Image (tube, rainbow, N blue to C red):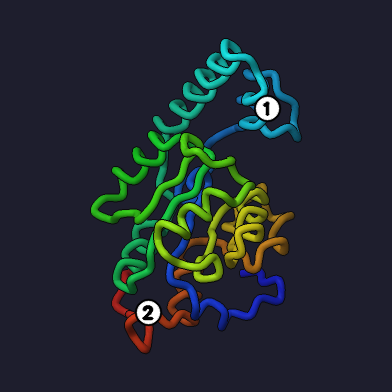
Protein backbone atom coordinates (compact mmCIF):
# COMPACT_ATOMS: atom_id res chain seq x y z
CA UNK A 1 0.00 0.00 0.00
CA UNK A 2 1.24 3.47 -0.93
CA UNK A 3 -0.27 6.56 0.66
CA UNK A 4 0.16 10.16 -0.44
CA UNK A 5 -0.07 11.44 3.16
CA UNK A 6 -3.68 10.27 3.15
CA UNK A 7 -5.46 10.27 6.48
CA UNK A 8 -7.18 6.90 6.56
CA UNK A 9 -9.70 8.03 9.16
CA UNK A 10 -11.31 9.87 6.22
CA UNK A 11 -12.51 6.46 5.02
CA UNK A 12 -15.05 6.58 7.85
CA UNK A 13 -17.30 8.85 5.78
CA UNK A 14 -17.41 6.51 2.77
CA UNK A 15 -20.89 5.23 1.91
CA UNK A 16 -20.24 4.11 -1.66
CA UNK A 17 -17.51 3.03 -4.06
CA UNK A 18 -17.31 3.99 -7.74
CA UNK A 19 -15.28 1.51 -9.78
CA UNK A 20 -13.64 1.78 -13.15
CA UNK A 21 -14.28 -1.35 -15.22
CA UNK A 22 -11.42 -2.33 -17.54
CA UNK A 23 -8.24 -3.17 -15.65
CA UNK A 24 -9.96 -2.60 -12.32
CA UNK A 25 -12.94 -4.93 -11.93
CA UNK A 26 -11.47 -6.99 -14.75
CA UNK A 27 -7.89 -8.14 -15.36
CA UNK A 28 -6.09 -5.79 -17.80
CA UNK A 29 -6.25 -7.27 -21.31
CA UNK A 30 -6.79 -4.30 -23.63
CA UNK A 31 -3.86 -3.06 -25.69
CA UNK A 32 -5.04 0.46 -26.44
CA UNK A 33 -2.08 1.07 -28.75
CA UNK A 34 -3.61 -1.48 -31.13
CA UNK A 35 -6.90 0.42 -31.02
CA UNK A 36 -5.11 3.69 -31.76
CA UNK A 37 -3.37 2.11 -34.74
CA UNK A 38 -6.67 0.82 -36.10
CA UNK A 39 -8.21 4.27 -35.73
CA UNK A 40 -5.14 6.21 -36.82
CA UNK A 41 -5.12 8.28 -33.63
CA UNK A 42 -1.77 9.23 -32.10
CA UNK A 43 -0.76 8.68 -28.48
CA UNK A 44 -1.79 11.53 -26.22
CA UNK A 45 -5.01 12.32 -28.09
CA UNK A 46 -8.24 11.34 -26.34
CA UNK A 47 -9.89 8.77 -28.62
CA UNK A 48 -13.51 9.44 -27.68
CA UNK A 49 -13.16 13.20 -27.91
CA UNK A 50 -11.29 12.94 -31.21
CA UNK A 51 -13.85 10.80 -33.03
CA UNK A 52 -16.62 13.17 -31.93
CA UNK A 53 -15.07 15.71 -34.30
CA UNK A 54 -15.25 13.35 -37.28
CA UNK A 55 -18.02 13.41 -39.86
CA UNK A 56 -20.91 10.97 -39.59
CA UNK A 57 -19.42 8.28 -41.85
CA UNK A 58 -16.00 8.31 -40.17
CA UNK A 59 -17.55 8.48 -36.71
CA UNK A 60 -19.68 5.42 -37.46
CA UNK A 61 -16.61 3.57 -38.77
CA UNK A 62 -14.67 4.48 -35.62
CA UNK A 63 -17.40 3.24 -33.31
CA UNK A 64 -17.49 -0.06 -35.24
CA UNK A 65 -13.73 -0.44 -34.74
CA UNK A 66 -14.06 0.34 -31.03
CA UNK A 67 -16.97 -2.08 -30.65
CA UNK A 68 -15.01 -4.91 -32.30
CA UNK A 69 -11.94 -4.13 -30.19
CA UNK A 70 -13.98 -4.23 -26.99
CA UNK A 71 -15.73 -7.41 -28.09
CA UNK A 72 -12.35 -9.11 -28.47
CA UNK A 73 -11.52 -8.09 -24.90
CA UNK A 74 -14.95 -9.11 -23.60
CA UNK A 75 -14.54 -12.60 -25.03
CA UNK A 76 -11.44 -13.15 -22.88
CA UNK A 77 -12.66 -11.19 -19.85
CA UNK A 78 -11.35 -12.28 -16.46
CA UNK A 79 -12.79 -10.92 -13.25
CA UNK A 80 -10.15 -9.27 -11.08
CA UNK A 81 -8.96 -11.39 -8.16
CA UNK A 82 -10.75 -10.48 -4.94
CA UNK A 83 -13.72 -8.83 -6.68
CA UNK A 84 -16.39 -11.23 -5.43
CA UNK A 85 -15.15 -11.06 -1.84
CA UNK A 86 -15.07 -7.26 -1.99
CA UNK A 87 -18.63 -7.10 -3.38
CA UNK A 88 -19.79 -9.46 -0.64
CA UNK A 89 -18.10 -7.25 1.96
CA UNK A 90 -19.78 -4.15 0.52
CA UNK A 91 -23.22 -5.72 0.57
CA UNK A 92 -22.83 -6.93 4.14
CA UNK A 93 -21.80 -3.45 5.19
CA UNK A 94 -24.37 -1.51 3.14
CA UNK A 95 -21.88 0.23 0.86
CA UNK A 96 -23.37 1.37 -2.45
CA UNK A 97 -21.70 0.19 -5.66
CA UNK A 98 -21.37 2.00 -9.00
CA UNK A 99 -19.34 1.76 -12.20
CA UNK A 100 -18.06 4.76 -14.18
CA UNK A 101 -16.33 3.58 -17.35
CA UNK A 102 -15.36 4.75 -20.82
CA UNK A 103 -16.57 1.36 -22.06
CA UNK A 104 -20.06 0.85 -23.48
CA UNK A 105 -23.06 0.25 -21.25
CA UNK A 106 -23.53 -3.07 -23.06
CA UNK A 107 -20.11 -4.27 -21.91
CA UNK A 108 -20.59 -2.95 -18.39
CA UNK A 109 -23.84 -4.92 -18.12
CA UNK A 110 -22.05 -7.99 -19.51
CA UNK A 111 -19.63 -7.77 -16.57
CA UNK A 112 -22.44 -7.18 -14.06
CA UNK A 113 -24.21 -10.30 -15.34
CA UNK A 114 -21.07 -12.28 -14.52
CA UNK A 115 -20.92 -11.20 -10.87
CA UNK A 116 -24.53 -12.02 -9.99
CA UNK A 117 -26.14 -12.15 -7.48
CA UNK A 118 -24.25 -8.98 -6.61
CA UNK A 119 -25.84 -5.83 -7.99
CA UNK A 120 -24.56 -2.37 -8.79
CA UNK A 121 -26.64 0.63 -7.83
CA UNK A 122 -25.78 2.77 -10.87
CA UNK A 123 -23.85 2.33 -14.12
CA UNK A 124 -22.35 5.02 -16.34
CA UNK A 125 -20.72 4.22 -19.68
CA UNK A 126 -19.81 6.24 -22.72
CA UNK A 127 -23.34 5.84 -24.09
CA UNK A 128 -24.65 8.22 -21.45
CA UNK A 129 -25.19 11.89 -22.22
CA UNK A 130 -22.09 12.85 -20.23
CA UNK A 131 -18.53 13.72 -21.13
CA UNK A 132 -16.20 10.69 -20.89
CA UNK A 133 -13.62 10.34 -18.14
CA UNK A 134 -11.51 12.10 -17.01
CA UNK A 135 -14.42 14.57 -17.00
CA UNK A 136 -16.27 13.95 -13.71
CA UNK A 137 -19.83 14.44 -15.04
CA UNK A 138 -20.51 10.69 -15.00
CA UNK A 139 -19.51 10.48 -11.36
CA UNK A 140 -21.71 13.47 -10.57
CA UNK A 141 -24.59 11.59 -12.22
CA UNK A 142 -23.88 8.66 -9.91
CA UNK A 143 -23.73 10.98 -6.90
CA UNK A 144 -27.08 12.53 -7.78
CA UNK A 145 -28.79 9.19 -8.40
CA UNK A 146 -27.49 7.65 -5.18
CA UNK A 147 -28.13 10.80 -3.14
CA UNK A 148 -24.59 10.99 -1.78
CA UNK A 149 -22.04 13.79 -1.76
CA UNK A 150 -18.78 13.33 -3.74
CA UNK A 151 -16.71 13.11 -0.54
CA UNK A 152 -18.81 10.13 0.56
CA UNK A 153 -17.40 8.08 -2.33
CA UNK A 154 -14.19 6.16 -2.84
CA UNK A 155 -13.22 6.03 -6.53
CA UNK A 156 -11.17 2.95 -7.45
CA UNK A 157 -9.40 2.71 -10.81
CA UNK A 158 -6.20 1.64 -12.51
CA UNK A 159 -5.25 4.71 -14.56
CA UNK A 160 -4.24 8.33 -14.12
CA UNK A 161 -7.53 9.23 -15.83
CA UNK A 162 -9.37 7.54 -12.96
CA UNK A 163 -7.35 9.49 -10.40
CA UNK A 164 -7.98 12.73 -12.29
CA UNK A 165 -11.70 11.97 -12.47
CA UNK A 166 -11.83 11.29 -8.75
CA UNK A 167 -10.00 14.47 -7.81
CA UNK A 168 -12.15 16.61 -10.13
CA UNK A 169 -15.25 14.95 -8.72
CA UNK A 170 -14.18 15.43 -5.10
CA UNK A 171 -14.00 11.81 -3.95
CA UNK A 172 -11.20 9.85 -2.30
CA UNK A 173 -9.03 8.27 -4.99
CA UNK A 174 -7.55 4.77 -4.88
CA UNK A 175 -5.26 3.37 -7.57
CA UNK A 176 -5.22 -0.41 -8.06
CA UNK A 177 -1.60 -1.05 -8.91
CA UNK A 178 -0.35 -3.15 -11.80
CA UNK A 179 2.92 -3.49 -13.69
CA UNK A 180 2.25 -0.48 -15.93
CA UNK A 181 0.78 2.17 -13.61
CA UNK A 182 3.15 2.29 -10.65
CA UNK A 183 4.59 5.62 -11.75
CA UNK A 184 1.21 7.14 -10.84
CA UNK A 185 1.04 5.51 -7.38
CA UNK A 186 1.54 8.73 -5.44
CA UNK A 187 -0.93 10.68 -7.60
CA UNK A 188 -3.87 8.97 -5.86
CA UNK A 189 -4.81 9.49 -2.22
CA UNK A 190 -3.64 5.92 -1.72
CA UNK A 191 -2.75 2.88 -3.84
CA UNK A 192 -3.25 -0.82 -3.20
CA UNK A 193 -1.80 -4.00 -4.65
CA UNK A 194 -5.09 -5.91 -4.61
CA UNK A 195 -8.76 -5.83 -3.71
CA UNK A 196 -7.92 -7.96 -0.68
CA UNK A 197 -5.68 -5.16 0.57
CA UNK A 198 -8.42 -2.61 -0.10
CA UNK A 199 -10.98 -4.74 1.73
CA UNK A 200 -8.69 -5.02 4.74
CA UNK A 201 -8.20 -1.23 4.79
CA UNK A 202 -11.95 -0.69 4.68
CA UNK A 203 -12.50 -3.22 7.44
CA UNK A 204 -9.91 -1.49 9.60
CA UNK A 205 -10.96 2.13 9.07
CA UNK A 206 -14.57 2.25 7.93
CA UNK A 207 -17.53 2.92 10.18
CA UNK A 208 -20.65 1.97 8.23
CA UNK A 209 -23.94 3.81 8.03
CA UNK A 210 -26.07 1.78 10.38
CA UNK A 211 -23.53 0.05 12.60
CA UNK A 212 -20.96 1.15 15.12
CA UNK A 213 -18.38 -1.28 13.79
CA UNK A 214 -17.54 -3.03 10.57
CA UNK A 215 -19.12 -6.38 9.78
CA UNK A 216 -16.25 -8.83 10.18
CA UNK A 217 -18.04 -11.84 8.73
CA UNK A 218 -17.11 -11.12 5.10
CA UNK A 219 -15.09 -13.73 3.22
CA UNK A 220 -11.33 -13.38 3.15
Give above or below for 99 relative to 87.
Answer: above
Q: Is residue 30 above or below residue 145?
A: above
Instruction: Report the residue marked by disc 1.
Output: 50
Looking at the image, is mark 2 or mark 1 earlier in the sequence? 1
Say what secondary structure mark 1 lies in: helix
| The N terminus, quarter of image | bottom right
196 above or below 211?
above
Task: Tell me if 163 is positioned left or right of 66 in this view.
Answer: right
For residue 76, side relative to residue 55 (left or right): left
Q: Residue at x 68, y 34 (%)?
A: 46
Quarter of the image for residue 16 reads bottom left
Image x and y of residue 143, in percent: 47, 60
Q: Residue 23's mark?
A: none
Toward the viewer: 197 or 14?
14
Q: Residue at x 53, y 16 (%)?
A: 60
| 126 sits to left or right of 169 | left
Q: Residue at x 39, y 30 (%)?
A: 75
Mark 1 neighbour class, 10 Å CA radius: few under 14, some 14 to 19, many 20 or more = few
Instruction: Give the alpha-carbon distance from disc 2 to disc 1, as whole Å.
Output: 42 Å
Query: Is disc 2 in contact with disc 1, using a CB cutoff of under 8 Å?
Result: no
Residue lying furthest top? 57
Q: Which mark identifies residue 209?
A: 2
Q: Secondary structure at mark 2?
A: loop
Residue at the spot x=75%, y=35% of the render?
A: 44
Q: Nearer the viewer, residue 17 or 143?
A: 143
| Residue sitting farthest toward the left | 117
Instruction: Please state the horizontal and vertical placement of residue 156, each as a whole percent of the image.
Output: 53, 58
Amino acid sequence: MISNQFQFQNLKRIKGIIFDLDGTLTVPCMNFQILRERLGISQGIDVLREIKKWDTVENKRAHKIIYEFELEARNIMQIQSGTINLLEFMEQNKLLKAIHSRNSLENIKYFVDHVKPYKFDHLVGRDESVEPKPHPSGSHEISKNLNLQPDQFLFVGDSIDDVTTSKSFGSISCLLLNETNRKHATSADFSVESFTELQNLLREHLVCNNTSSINVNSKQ
